[in-house]
Image: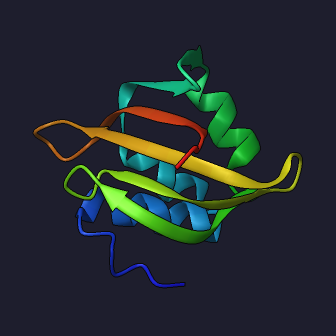
Amino acid sequence: MDTSKLTNETVKKAFEALQKGEKETWSSLFTADAELYDDGSPRDLRAFNNNAIGHERFTSVDKVENDGKDIYGQFHSDQWGDFKVYFKFHINNEEKIHRLDIGQGIY
């Protein structure tokens, strides 16, 4: 998969951890009070980390926006199948993710 579009280093590390199912690496990139929103609704980030990492992954990166912090692409979930998604990372001054917005992509 071509990941050359991933220009933000924190996002690239998170993407690689997600793809490899590396929960500890993925979790280490977030602030202690990080928030997760799924299609605009608050969701438990810890539960997502435990349930999704290792079972969900991008199958393609279709576009990247917002200085490399927004990823749109095809996605596979062992539970839900294949569909388009977006992951929008919000990163603080310490290069930690303090919010992640995910949802079904319409683009």
Q: What residue appears at the point 59 percent right and 72 percent down from the top-left corner?
A: 60
Q: Can you say whether 67 is above or below 49 in the image?
A: below
Q: What residue appears at the point 60 percent right and 30 percent down from the top-left corner?
A: 46
Q: Can you say whether 60 is above or below 22 in the image?
A: below
Q: Residue furthest left?
A: 93
Q: State the image coordinates of residue 41 (x, y, percent, origin top left).
A: 58, 15
Q: What residue appears at the point 52 percent right and 46 percent down from the top-left corner?
A: 86
Q: Can you say whether 58 is above or below 43 in the image?
A: below
Q: State the image coordinates of residue 36 (x, y, percent, origin top left).
A: 50, 26
Task: Name the foreground residue: 100 vs 66.
Answer: 66
Q: Is residue 94 left or right of residue 71?
A: left
Q: Residue furthest front?
A: 107
Task: Name the foreground residue: 57 vs 17.
Answer: 57
Q: Is residue 43 left or right of residue 88?
A: right
Residue 58, located in which quarter of the rendered image? bottom right
Figure coloring: rainbow
Q: Can you say whether 38 is above or below 67 in the image?
A: above
Q: State the image coordinates of residue 50 (x, y, percent, origin top left).
A: 70, 40
Q: In this view, does 9 lie to the left or right of 4?
A: left
How many numbered badges does the structure rendering display? 0
Q: State the image coordinates of residue 75 (x, y, percent, origin top left).
A: 68, 59
Residue 45, located in which quarter of the rendered image? top right
Q: Is residue 67 left or right of residue 54?
A: left
Q: What residue appears at the point 41 percent right and 64 percent down from the top-left corner?
A: 63
Quadrant containing the N terminus is bottom right
